[in-house]
C-alpha cells in the first residue's frame, strides 16, 4: 500500500526571501521600514508576563473593539486573524463552497490559487488589461465568489471605488472580497460600501502601513452575517488564534491614527521620488499606489538586475514567470535605502553597457 496516494498535495506559496545575514537592504517583502507605533511599544513594555500562562480571549475582544471604534463599525462586523493571510484563508473556507469557480486576476497575490488548491475550490483567473487594470465587466459572469487586492499586487495599480462597486453590485449571490493590504498608501477604501452590500468583505492588515508584520495581525470588516459565518468556522478550527501580547499591542497601534498617517506619508513621499529616479534610469512601471513599485528595466534584463543587486546585498523581488518575468517589485524603503539602490543601479547599468 502506498500511503502517499492519500496525501493532499499542493504547490505551496513561495514568500519573498528572508536573508539570514546582516548588513543588507531588504526591499523584497513590502515590509515597512519604520518602527511600529510608540503606543504599541508601550503596550509591549507594560505587558504582564504572568498572563502568558492564560489562554487569550477567543474573540480577541480588546483588539476587535479597538478596530471597530477606529473604523466606525460594530464589533460584530469585525473579524481578526493571524495576519491577513489567515483571515483570507478562513474566508476561502467559509464562503467559497458553491462548486462554481472563484474569480481573481491572472496577475495578483499568488496565495489565492494556493488556497483554492488546498481547499479544492475551482477557480478561474481573469486576465488583466494590457496596462494591468481590472475590467469590471469580466467579473459579471457566473461564479462562486470573487477576490482581488486593491491596490493590486504585485502591480500596485489602484482601481476606483466605482469599479469595485460595479462588481459587488453585479454579484449579489456571491461574496466579494477586496484585499486592501496596501490601501493606506494613497487609495480610497471601499469599507463604507460594507454598509450597503451584505456580500462585501474588506480585508486589511497591520503588516504594511501599521509596521507590524512580525506580530501577524489581519482583520476583515463586513456585514454582521458574514462575520458570524467566519467566526463559526474559526471557532470550529482553533478558538485561540491570537495571543495576548498581539491583542494588546494591536489594540494600542490601531488607535494611533496620527502615527499611521505620519509613517504612511513618509513612504508615499519616498515612493513618488522613486518613480522619478527609476524613470530617469529607464524603468517603466504602472502608477503605483502601494508601498512598492512594479518596475521594468530597459537597460538590462530584470533577472540580471535582480542578481546583481543581490550581489550588492540589496534584495528586491523577481518572478521568473510569463508576462511579469520582465519586472522587479521594489519595496519602498527609507530615503537612505532607496539612494543606495539608485547608486547600485547606476553601477549595474554602467557594467552592462560596457
Image (spheres, rainbow, N blue to C red):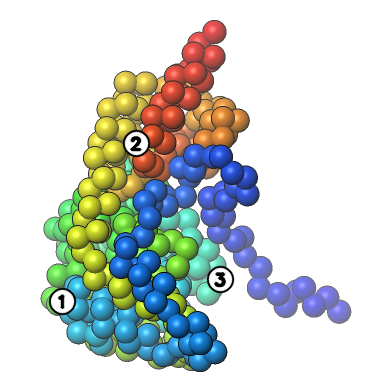
Of residues 262 and 227, the one nearer the viewer is 262
Picture coordinates of residue 252, whole percent (x, y): 30, 73
Q: Height in image: 10 above or below 34?
A: below
Question: Which is nearer the N-term, disc 3 or disc 2?
Answer: 3
Judged from this view, the residue extending furthest toward the right is 1
Q: Check disc 3: other Cα within 10 Å, few if <14, some if 14-19, many if 20+.
A: some
The label nearer to you, 2 versus 1, is: 2
Q: Residue at x 19, y 78 (%)?
A: 69
Residue beneath disc 3: 118
Q: Where does the C terminus fall, quadrant-wise? A: top right
Residue beneath disc 2: 335
Q: Residue at x 26, y 83 (%)?
A: 65
Picture coordinates of residue 260, whole percent (x, y): 25, 59
Q: Could you tell me which secondary element the residue under label 2 belongs to? A: helix
- In three-dimensional space, the C-alpha distance between marks 2 and 1, rounded to whole angstroms, equals 34 Å
Q: Check disc 1: other Cα within 10 Å, few if <14, some if 14-19, many if 20+.
A: few
Quarter assignment of residue 331:
top left
Residue beneath disc 1: 72
Question: Is residue 32 found left or right of 353 in the rendered image?
Answer: left
Image mark for residue 153: none
Picture coordinates of residue 269, whole percent (x, y): 24, 40
Of residues 9 and 303, the one nearer the viewer is 303
Picture coordinates of residue 352, whole percent (x, y): 53, 15
Amino acid at each position: 500500500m502506498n500511503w502517499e496516494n492519500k496525501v493532499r498535495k499542493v504547490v505551496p506559496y513561495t514568500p519573498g526571501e528572508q536573508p539570514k545575514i546582516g548588513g543588507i537592504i531588504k526591499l523584497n517583502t513590502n515590509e515597512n521600514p519604520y518602527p511600529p507605533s510608540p503606543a504599541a511599544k508601550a503596550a509591549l513594555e507594560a505587558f504582564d508576563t504572568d498572563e502568558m500562562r492564560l489562554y487569550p480571549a477567543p474573540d480577541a475582544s480588546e483588539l476587535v473593539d479597538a478596530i471597530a471604534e477606529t473604523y466606525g463599525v460594530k464589533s460584530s462586523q469585525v473579524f481578526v486573524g493571524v495576519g491577513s493571510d489567515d483571515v483570507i484563508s478562513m474566508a476561502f473556507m467559509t464562503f467559497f463552497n458553491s462548486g462554481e469557480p472563484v474569480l481573481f486576476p491572472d496577475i495578483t497575490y499568488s496565495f489565492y490559487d494556493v488556497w483554492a488548491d488546498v481547499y479544492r475550490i475551482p477557480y478561474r483567473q481573469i486576465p488583466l488589461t494590457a496596462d494591468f487594470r481590472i475590467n469590471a465587466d469580466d467579473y459579471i459572469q457566473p461564479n462562486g465568489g470573487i477576490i482581488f487586492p486593491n491596490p493590486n499586487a504585485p502591480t500596485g495599480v489602484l482601481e476606483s471605488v466605482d469599479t469595485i462597486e460595479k462588481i459587488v453590485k453585479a454579484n449579489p449571490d456571491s461574496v466579494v472580497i477586496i484585499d486592501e493590504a496596501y490601501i493606506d498608501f494613497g487609495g480610497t477604501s471601499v469599507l463604507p460600501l460594507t454598509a450597503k452590500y451584505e456580500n462585501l468583505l474588506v480585508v486589511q492588515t497591520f503588516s504594511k502601513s501599521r509596521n507590524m508584520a512580525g506580530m501577524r495581525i489581519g482583520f476583515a470588516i463586513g456585514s454582521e452575517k458574514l462575520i458570524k459565518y467566519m467566526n463559526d468556522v474559526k471557532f470550529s478550527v482553533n478558538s485561540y488564534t491570537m495571543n495576548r501580547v498581539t491583542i494588546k499591542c494591536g489594540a494600542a497601534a490601531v488607535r494611533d491614527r496620527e502615527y499611521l498617517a505620519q509613517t504612511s506619508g513618509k513612504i508615499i513621499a519616498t515612493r513618488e521620488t522613486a518613480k522619478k529616479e527609476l524613470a530617469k534610469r529607464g524603468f517603466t512601471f504602472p502608477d503605483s499606489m502601494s508601498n512598492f513599485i512594479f518596475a521594468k528595466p530597459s537597460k538590462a534584463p530584470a533577472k540580471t538586475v535582480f542578481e546583481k543587486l543581490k550581489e550588492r546585498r540589496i534584495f528586491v523581488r523577481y518572478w521568473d514567470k510569463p508576462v511579469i518575468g520582465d519586472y522587479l517589485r521594489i519595496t519602498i524603503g527609507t530615503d537612505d535605502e532607496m539612494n543606495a539602490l539608485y547608486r547600485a543601479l547606476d553601477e549595474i547599468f554602467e557594467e552592462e553597457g560596457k
